Amino acid sequence: MKNNISKILNIFIAVIALIGAILFIRIFMEDSTAIETDMEVQNSVISPIIVFSTSLLYLAIGISVIMSVGNLIKNPDSLKKTLFGLVALGVILVIAYFTGDSLAVTDPQGKVLEGGEAGSSINQWVSTGIWYSMFLGIIAGAFFVYDLLKGLVKS
């Protein structure tokens, strides 16, 4: 059974690689200036590889999500750990949201930029994203140092 699935996957991968190679070769067969200037050439040569790549991306995302959810359902202990991790990330996000500010965004001369008025929700979420990244970086660094020290003590 596993051997048949392996053969099917290898054929599927070969077909994807062949289609990608054909689309890629079609781009190199066209004149570079025609690709840059002629909309008709762009639509006939560039658009198919973009659609193909985007489709592969969505397929990969879909398969990853389906497989992850399937594994979580099969393994309830893993589901508990995942939910705990999501709750922890949510708590950190809430802390980052209240740590962030929504002050006006100014240029070097002190003028308020367009769309950067004080109290803007965009300013709040950008600030939240910055604080969230900082908090996660600090936590990751702490775990790295902890793991390093733990490894040194064991040696």
Image: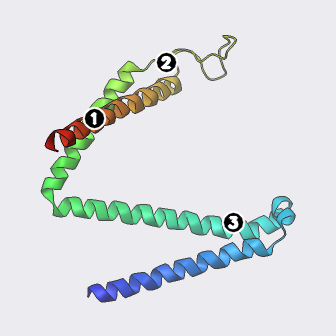
Q: Is residue 88 above or below residue 46?
A: above
Contact, mark 3 vs mark 2 (Cβ under 8 Å):
no
Residue 9 is tagged as: none
User: What residue appears at the point 66 percent right and 17 percent down from the top-left corner?
Assistant: 107
Distance from disc 2 to disc 1, alpha carbons, whole Å, reads 33 Å
Q: Position of residue 22 (x, y in %)?
A: 66, 79
**x 27%, y 60%: residue:** 69
Vertically, is 96 above or below 69? above
Tell me where residue 12 appears, x and y as whole percent.
Answer: 46, 81
Residue 145: give its label.
1
Give the amino acid type for the residue marked by disc 2 in the picture. Ser
Instruction: Give the class, few, some or many, for how many residues have Cα within 10 Å of label 2's Cα (few <14, many ≥20).
Output: some
Q: In this view of the protein, which residue sits in the foreground, 145 or 33? A: 145
**Residue sitting at 32 percent across and 89 percent down?**
4
Type of amino acid at the residue the image marks with label 3: Ser
**Residue 154 placement: quadrant:** top left
Labels 3 and 1: the sequence-earlier one: 3
Nearest the eye: 102 or 131: 131
- Is 51 rendered above or below residue 131? below
| Residue at numbered disc 3 | 47
Is label 3 in contact with label 1 (beta carbons under 8 Å)?
no
Q: What residue sits right under mark 2 in the picture?
A: 102
Q: Is residue 16 left or right of residue 22?
A: left
- Secondary element at tag 1: helix
- Label 1 near label 2: C-beta < 8 Å? no
Nearest the eye: 18 or 113: 18
